[in-house]
Image (tube, rainbow, N blue to C red):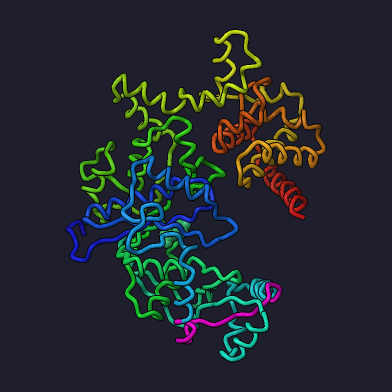
Amino acid sequence: MSEPQSTPVRTRVAPSPTGDPHVGTAYIALFNWAFAKRHGGQFVLRLEDTDQARSSAASERMIQESLRWVGIDWDEGPDVGGPHGPYRQSERLSIYAEHVQTLLDGGHAFHCFCTPERLDAMRAEQRAAGETTRYDGHCLGISAEEATRRIEAGGAHVVRMRVPEEGVCRFEDVLRGEIEIPYSQIDMQVLVKGDGFPTYHLAVVVDDHLMGITHVLRGEEWINSVPKHVLLHEYFGWTMPQQVHLPLLRNKDQSKLSKRKNPTSINYFRDIGILPEALVNYLGLMGWSMPDEREIFTPQELSEAMDLARISLGGPIFDLDKLSWLNGQYLRALSREEFAARVVQWMLNDERVGQLVPLVQERTEKLSDLAPQVDYLIGERRSLSQEDFEALKIDGETCARILDHTLRALDELREWERDAIFSTCQQLSEFLELKLRDYLKPLFLAVSGKHVSLPLFDSMVFLGSDVTRMRIRDALNVIGVSKKAAKRLEKNYAAFAARATS
Ligand code: GLU
């Protein structure tokens, strides 16, 4: 496996630009990059932006910036171009349309006119009977002529793929050997949505093929989708790229790494002063160990040693303490000049200081007043205790509610800007029947570690969404929420969310 291969190796990372740049994306990118480099091949960045409602240009930009920040570059991609472009799926719609037509013509796909109500009822029935919910084939019998007539009459529809009723899908995963999944577990997947956009499954198969991808290294959460991809390859008469499903990153409690429990955005690690070379090194330790077991290495060294057989499948734990330790190793190895340069790059630069000035200038008598006012903005905030919250004279349950609901609402916020944060908090304070002033007290404490601090919403904007949310999460842990109370909080928040969307 470690010998250079005869066909040029081509790998890709295919993030969906729907939020913060996730460490999982950098992890998958790193292994694809290293594998391609090891074999003298190419590495492609493709943006899977077929979810129109959730994709954003800001997320796209952050993904590219953050990958470059950790030192991963690509041979082909939306910004650098290449012979297999466009590399943004929303710009490839005509390619998908052509391929769907081939599937329809071959009888491998069909138009489905089922209404959401019918599909809901179908699923409810299946659930009641204890079955897995899947499409029941209702529209399979519609002839091509009838489908055309209904489409011309403006009938809302999607395109679904055919899936055999029986039999087993068998495929090879380079790390796991043969995997078998019965077709009875596979849904007649929607390939083209009502808005005319392809779904992931169609786009990924078409693009990997047309872009000449030879090895697909991606997270193990995609294994169950492979049978759909196997079928689509058969329908098109194409050969599958090799499948390599890397182990998922996990929280300390073994659950899938999630922003509910851990910071997951690369921006967070940048903002707290983790060096990019330490972060990328740490990601290289996820499921991988160097032949000589050394823990400090560069992406280049990783690529030179890259051998898929060395990847271990036990879920790697993304451990912030271990990352900090590694970062310390890197920081201490810097020269004095380089260390100083990093501090400037990180925070003590015109841009960051410039963002602080409007918050502090009016509140300052001497320049030296500055540091104590902004300590929690440029450094970690002090640790909190239960007594800190008791001193607020707001009962524990209410405090927990405020923090929990704010955290949940901020998790869902798409734009991290002052007005949006403010209006979220205002709505929540009304929902909780609290004066805004009281509602904000525990938040001031959670964010700044102080009872009186610089303006809260500006502080949150300066800190960024990840650091802010991490601090609120930490405050909730300090208060302590029992399992029973957590259930109540969840239910109560659901009532707020339902009210907010109605
Ligand atoms: N767009 C998918 C994602 O966001 C890509 C999965 C794949 O690599 O096939 O993870």
Percent x, y of residue 163: 49, 80
Q: What stretch is highlighted in magenta?
A: 102-118
161 up-or-down from 90: above or below: below
Quarter of the image for residue 261 reads top right
- In the rendered view, would you say 217 is above or below 388? below
Q: Residue at x 72, y 40 (%)?
A: 423
- Rendered-image quadrant of the N terminus: bottom left
Nearer-the-camera pick, 257 or 90: 90
Task: Give the total of numbered labels.
Answer: 0
Task: Identify whether 303 is placed above or below 207.
Answer: above
Q: In which quarter of the image is the C terminus?
A: bottom right
Q: Position of residue 445 (x, y in %)?
A: 65, 26
**Rendered location of residue 471, percent (x, y):** 58, 32
Answer whether residue 112 is magenta in the image. yes
Residue 270 seen in the figure: yes
Quadrant for ligand 1 reads bottom left
Q: Give whichever of 47, 86 is nearer the camera.
A: 86
Residue 391 in the figure: left or right of residue 293: right
Q: Which residue is drawn at 36% across and 24% down?
A: 341
Residue drawn at x 68%, y 76% is: 115
Report if residue 482 lies within the magenta region.
Answer: no
- Residue 378 drawn above or below residue 59: above
Q: Is residue 500 left or right of residue 321?
A: right
Q: Nearer the viewer, residue 478 or 5?
A: 5
Q: Which of 290 and 280 is in front in this view?
A: 280
Whether residue 129 is visible, yes or no, is no
Location of residue 232 (image quadrant) = bottom left
Residue drawn at the location 57% of the way across and 38% of the way down: 465
x and y percentages locating residue 213 in the rendered image: 32, 64
